[in-house]
Amino acid sequence: METKIITIETQKYPKDCWYVAGMSDEFEKEELKNRVIAGSSIVVWRTKDGKVVAFDNRCCHKRFPLSEGRLLDNGFLECAYHGLCYDDSGKCVKIPSVPDKPIPERAKLRPVKVIEQDNLVWVWVGNPERAHLFMPPRTPEIADKEWATVHSEVIRVPANFLLIIENLLDITHFYPLHEGNIGDYANSLLPIDIEEGEEGGYQYVRTVRNAKNYKQPPFFIDWFHFDNVDRSHTHCMVTPALTRVELKIGPTGQFGSGLGGGGKDRGYILFHTHTPIDNVQSDWRWYVCCPADHKSLGDPTKRTVDRIAEMFPSVVDEDKWALERQQKMIDLPDEGYTELFLHSDTGLRRARQIISQMIREEKQSSIKAA
């Protein structure tokens, strides 16, 4: 699929952000991967020594995509078009057509910064001079042996990544979009609190919904037991690349012992990574983490996390259906249309403001550097 590279004046996503390129186990040694992230095509691989490296995917000679090349036995990346070879620092070390000439100093690849932590590989495709201002968020439960984790494959969504973030921060859409599985009308009536702060250089926004004696929708009963519960449900845009959802429940009047680590509460940590490809395409992944010893009520032979992995994709399909149609309406001329914001949209609107500010700061930094 051809991807248009978008300038900062028109882009609707921040480039100066750590985005997830994949889980650690997706990058086996000496296997080339291509990722298109925030308008940039990059080639990623794990070296013989186990280090993940990433570079601009264009050969410095004729722009041929290096991800279509191969890794040689000596570890060099060979371009499939003219055979130029690069080492794992991005330096060109061989040009077959001019073996008797010195290799030009500028024959090298633009490096892409990589950080591997908590079983995720994060890349920075933006201005390398600003990378030190931010750190990828931690996702410790994904790597913790006391937690069981199941994750989705990459879900290609034909919509801007901000629409995914807004969908994740907003559970008033659980009715009617998810009625009968994770949603009901009573969910729409829950009061919403907003929390904000800064961590790792990013502004975050969190929506908080607490409930007493709440009758759970069918999927939650299947996964976490108990018909009526007290619960805490938070959705946090930690960074433009990651939303963290935390659900903790307990029988009415017995809630608060803690999730995992011997606590009596049940629930999950649900991470969502949302990576812009361009203005109207995004890659979405979800990672659900539950205490490893928790079993489901619907099928007591299965761990809760595995039961969720079976059933949750139908919920995501409903969200994808809505996001695709929402994007189609956004692509039409507004012709006087003005979007209505409700009080329940406070967190969503704050997320838009945070991301818009990040894009403005990118533009300002690029002007100063020019």
Image (cartoon, rainbow, N blue to C red):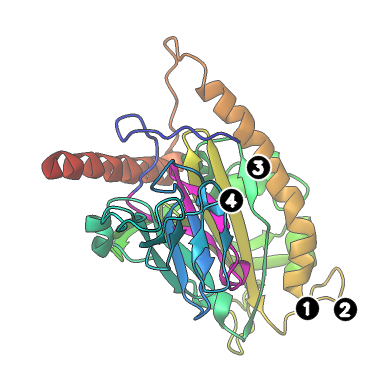
Q: Are marks 2 and 1 in contact (CB under 8 Å)?
A: yes
Could you say whether the residue bearing mark 3 is in a helix, strand or loop? helix
The numbered mark, 3 or 1, whose residue comes first in the sequence reads 1
Query: Real-space Cα distance between discs 4 and 2?
Result: 44 Å
| Residue lying farthest to the top in this orientation | 335
Q: Position of residue 51 (x, y in %)?
A: 47, 75
36 or 284, nearer to the observer = 36
Image coordinates for residue 366, horizontal then vertical, percent: 19, 42
Going from N to C along the chain, the mark reached first, 4 or 3, is 4
**Marker disc for residue 319:** 3
The quadrant holding residue 158 is top right
Q: In which quarter of the image is residue 142?
A: bottom right
Which span is picked out in magenta? 16-42
Residue furthest out toward the bottom: 262
What amino acid type should be assigned to the residue bearing mark 1? Answer: Lys
Q: Residue at x 75, y 63 (%)?
A: 309
Q: Name the residue under label 1.
A: 295
**Of the residues shown, which amino acid type is indicated by label 3?**
Asp
Q: Choose the circle earlier in sequence order: 4 or 2.
A: 4
